[in-house]
Amino acid sequence: MYVALAIVLTAALAVLVMIKKQHVESTPAPEPDPNNKLHWLVADGGDPLRNSWHLGARRVTAGRAASNYMQLTAPGMSRRHAAFYVDVDKVTIVDMSSSNGTRVNGNPVQTARLFDGDVVELAGARFTYRREGNFAANAAWKAKEVGRKVDTTTSMPETMLQLRAQATFQLNGGDVQKTASEVGISVDKLEQLIAAS
């Protein structure tokens, strides 16, 4: 009797395995989203213009210095805080001898491989590593573009003169004569600069 029961159970199990296999084979795999990109760092909160960085397939540095792809101003951030190395499907984070350290999932690290969902902390800034996704437009490029526009604008002599004239005018409480004298321009030129703002 036990032998017959064992045969029936084995046969039933084999039928269930075949049904499951047929179901899996007949279920189409979801189409990959063409907008998704690999390797993202998504910040926890903060300025929405600076909330995600697409690491792509490059070496990325993070820190306070303007030369970093991820320029971060969190308290305690080192000039060159950390670097991310991307090798096809593998992302490694390396602490760049920062003064306040680098953590992955709460643990201090010098070097660590990142996996989807890992939480990375650089001084006071927290990010979640996402292997794949579409986290809107690349915020780092937007921020860099804004910076380039500001640099271009403020490097124009007339714009610098206008900014200086406006600031001096406000500091002097609207005294046109005193402002023109301090800035070194005529009253007419000062009035033109103030009217253009």
Image (cartoon, rainbow, N blue to C red):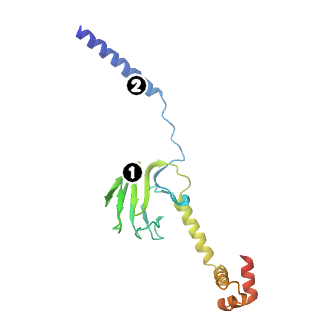
Foreground residue, 115 or 174?
174
Query: Could you classify mark 1 by the number of other residues whose Cα lies within 10 Å: few (under 14), some (14-19), or many (20 or more)?
Result: some
Element carrying mark 1: loop
Element carrying mark 2: helix
Foreground residue, 83 or 166?
166
User: x and y percent of residue 74 in the render?
Assistant: 45, 65
Q: Which residue is mark 1?
A: 118
Of the numbered discs in the image, which one, if any, rests on residue 105? none
Foreground residue, 88 or 166?
166
Q: Which residue is mark 2?
A: 21
User: x and y percent of residue 2 in the render?
Assistant: 23, 10
Q: Eyeballing the image, is 22 above or below 96?
A: above
Q: Give the residue drawn at x 65%, y 90%.
A: 182
* Quadrant holding the C terminus: bottom right
Q: Eyeballing the image, is 23 above or below 64?
A: above
User: x and y percent of residue 117 in the render?
Assistant: 41, 48
Q: Give the residue drawn at x 46%, y 48%.
A: 132
Kind of residue at disc 2: Lys
Q: Earlier in the sequence, mark 2 or mark 1?
A: 2
Q: Nearer the viewer, mark 2 or mark 1?
A: 1
